[in-house]
Image (cartoon, grey):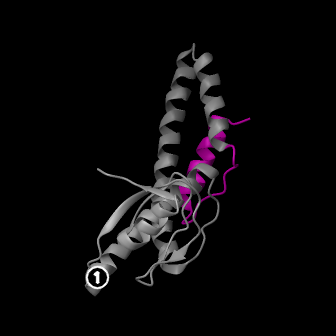
């Protein structure tokens, strides 16, 4: 069972470490249970204080881990390494932010190299493995529901194969 002291200990460890501290996969559900339980018994001033304090400490933890995940995404793209100690919700966030960073870096590279191919925004209708486009850049992998901006030639192929649909803004 999660306690206030356990949460504080995790935050202290997270602040002291350069890497992500390992958390149980069900950490968010345990936190949710803890907060609900505290909310139900927050009759005394001490219980109310502990609930408010726990929320502040949890917010700090989430912000610290978000910053680390953003930095890990950049590092991972440059080095090709796969970071450890992410719970499933964080892994999903990491993968999405990494995909957007790769797209942004690819578009910057295209500007620097003078490529001017038009791009299209796509919503993926099914999982698509990584592939090499006509510009010799690697795109993906993409999961059903992902959104990405790709060169028009790659987008047309994916739309024609019903793997994605164009997003018009």
Given residues 25 and 49, the one toward you in this image is 25
Who's the residue at 59% across and 28% down the image? Answer: 35
Given residues 5 and 78, the one toward you in this image is 78
Given residues 46 and 138, the one toward you in this image is 138
Who's the residue at 53% across and 53% down the image? Answer: 125
The quarter in which the N terminus is drawn is: top right
Q: Position of residue 43 (x, y in %)?
A: 57, 13
Given residues 69 and 133, the one toward you in this image is 133
Provide the residue span drawn in magenta.
1-26
Q: Residue 81, relative to residue 31: is it above or below?
A: below
Q: In which quarter of the image is residue 81?
A: bottom right
**Residue found at the very far right of the displayed protein:** 1
Q: Is residue 16 magenta?
A: yes
Who's the residue at 54% across and 34% down the image? Answer: 54
In this rendering, position of residue 36 left or right of residue 155: right
Q: Position of residue 30 (x, y in %)?
A: 67, 36
Q: Mark 1 points at which residue?
A: 115
Q: Is residue 70 visible?
A: no
In this rendering, position of residue 16 left or right of residue 116: right
Q: Residue 164, relative to residue 113: is it above or below?
A: above
Q: Residue 164, relative to residue 7: is it above or below?
A: below
Mark 1, Cα crowd under 10 Å, few <14 / some 14-19 / many 20+, is few
**Residue found at the very far front of the displayed protein:** 160
In this rendering, position of residue 31 left or right of residue 151: right
Q: Residue 74, relative to residue 166: is it above or below?
A: below
Secondary element under disc 1, as helix, strand or loop, is: loop
Q: In which quarter of the image is residue 149?
A: bottom left
Q: Can residue 165 be seen in this view?
A: yes
């Amino acid at each position: 069972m999660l306690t206030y002291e356990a949460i504080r200990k995790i935050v202290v460890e997270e602040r002291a470490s350069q890497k992500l501290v390992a958390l149980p996969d069900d950490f968010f559900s345990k936190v949710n249970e803890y907060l609900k339980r505290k909310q139900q018994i927050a009759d005394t001033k001490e219980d109310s204080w502990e609930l408010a304090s726990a929320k502040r400490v949890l917010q700090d933890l989430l912000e610290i881990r978000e910053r680390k995940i953003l930095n890990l995404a950049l590092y991972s793209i440059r080095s090709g390494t796969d970071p450890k100690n992410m719970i499933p919700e964080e892994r999903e966030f990491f993968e999405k932010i990494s995909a957007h960073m790769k797209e942004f870096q690819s578009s910057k590279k295209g500007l620097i190299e003078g490529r001017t191919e038009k791009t299209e925004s796509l919503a993926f209708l099914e999982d698509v493995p990584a592939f090499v486009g006509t510009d010799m850049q690697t795109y993906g992998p993409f999961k059903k529901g992902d959104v990405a901006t790709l060169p028009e030639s790659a987008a047309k192929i994916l739309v024609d194969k019903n793997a994605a649909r164009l997003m018009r803004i």
